Image (cartoon, rainbow, N blue to C red):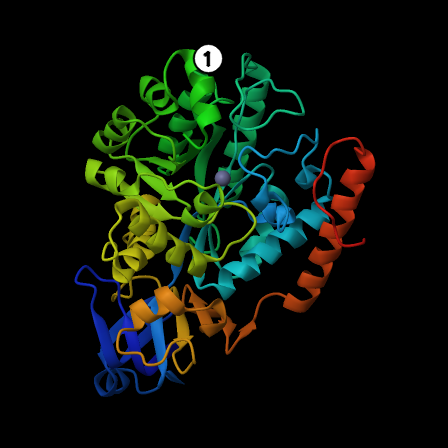
Amino acid sequence: MTTTVITNATIVTCDAARTVLYDSALAIDGSRIAAVGPTAQVRASYPDAEVVGGRGKAVFPGLINCHAHLTANLFRGISEDFGFPSSFSFPDDVRNMVSDEETVIMAILGAIECARTGCTTTVEISSGIDRYAGALAQTGLRWVLAENTSDGVVEPTFRAGEPVLQYSDALREKSLEQATRLFEKWDGQEEGRITCMGSTGLVETSSPALLRDVHTLAERYDSRYTIHLNQSQLEVESLMLMRGVRPTQSLFANDYLGPRLLAAHCRFLDPSEISLLGTTRSNIAHQPAMAARRAVIPPIPALRDAGCTIGMGTDNNTQDMVEVMRTGLFTERILRQDGTNPQPEDVLMMTTMGSAKAIGMADSIGSLEVGKKADLFVVNTRRSNLAPTMRIVSAFVHNGQPSDIESVMVDGGFVMRDGKVLKVDEEAVIAEADGIGRRVWHRLLKKYPNVPFPVTLAPE
Ligand SMILES: [Zn+2]
């Protein structure tokens, strides 16, 4: 077991009192935090430890992303600008037009971005995660893998939010089997660094029977389960048409709300739905940067007041959790029309302890406290955009850049150190991913020359 002590640093603990310690040290023994306190005292307790100098540095708990689709970085630079559901009408998704090897590259690209933006734990939601779960495990980061299930019978041109009128038992059984297989293979692997979560993709593509089965699956493995909920006005209208109730009301009727639920987005809610989510103590995954791109601000203050726990996430295109914190601060202030609420400390707490609670891991991650997992990132505060650093949390939330992050540790081991990502060949992955993106988009356009596409792409 190696012991490491980071000395003379500013330590942003994110404990219940939101304590920030100055000129202090943090000792890591194996995978856990062994001590936090005055440098001299901690060094004396661990005289043989490897010392990492922290002067001019700030140590934060690793950020926790409650909602990601890593390989949707294939849409980067394109889908951000065409609404939700997208105004494109291709009968194909570029994610289904790449090989398994190419999927692995795009997933690793997303993982590198997680590390570079201080994110140590990510909930990855997709179909066919087993294709790249091993590659994610090798990045050294902490993952919660959520295999999507769905049993709606839809056309290839189906867009999220459209009404679904038929469900298939065969599809339900097949996707449940795949989700169960992922749990069996990965839940608890890598000394607990990899866990799993249940997932139904969309309300409209999930029959009541599927909702029941995924809820049961999550109970069997004592995990959370997630779903995209009330993410568009179209989805609300479709549910009214399909089931005569709004999406959250439909989930309530099918016993899907509750403390195990991680409901993503929750953008278009009426007061009855906010009340249902709150009284059932459901958890919310809030993706402020993606919502802002969609020109929406979800009713986060009302959900919080109703009793929900709020965690933060990215969604598609990018995994930049630094941007997520800042956008979360901006959009909630705009919603409240109040330039003082929330404070940067509130947003940091949402992205650390809030997310940890929302995914059921508050006992082990989310703050820098003795006994917790050593998941953290180190910021170089000697930067033109951060100094003076009298209030480092505010400075970082308002002005921080991913490039201020020097080192990232997960489970007591560095996954990035002094600006270098350690477990993967970053340069090679970026070059390959760029080629994959160019090839697949040009292939899509060649395959469907008559589908309107108001974008000029770089040459292949
Ligand atoms: Zn999503």
Image quadrant where one finds the N terminus = bottom left
Name above or below for residue 318 compared with residue 58: above
Residue 387 in percent (x, y) is at 36, 80
- Residue 428 or 34: which is nearer the viewer? 428
Residue 264 in percent (x, y) is at 41, 38
Query: What residue is shown at x 59% (from left), y 45% (from top)?
Result: 72
| Residue 306 visible in the shown view | yes
Name above or below for residue 82 compared with residue 50: above
Disc 1 is placed on an element classified as helix
- Residue 108 or 51: which is nearer the viewer? 108
Q: Residues within 10 Å of mark 1 (few under 14, many from 20)?
A: some
* Left or right placement of residue 318 versus residue 289 in this view: right
Name above or below for residue 134 compared with residue 85: below
Query: What residue is shown at x 32% (from left), y 35% (from top)?
Result: 260
Label 1 belongs to which residue? Answer: 242
Kindly tell me whether mark 1's CB lies below 8 Å from ligand 1: no
* Left or right placement of residue 313 versus residue 113 in this view: left
Point out the residue furthest to the front here: 337
Residue 366 in percent (x, y) is at 32, 58
Image quadrant in which you'd find residue 444: top right
Query: What residue is shown at x 42% (from left), y 40% (from top)?
Result: 296
Mark 1: amino acid: Met
**Number of callouts:** 1
Image quadrant in which you'd find residue 307: top left
| Residue 360 visible in the shown view | no
Residue 148 in percent (x, y) is at 52, 33
* Left or right placement of residue 216 versus residue 276 in this view: right
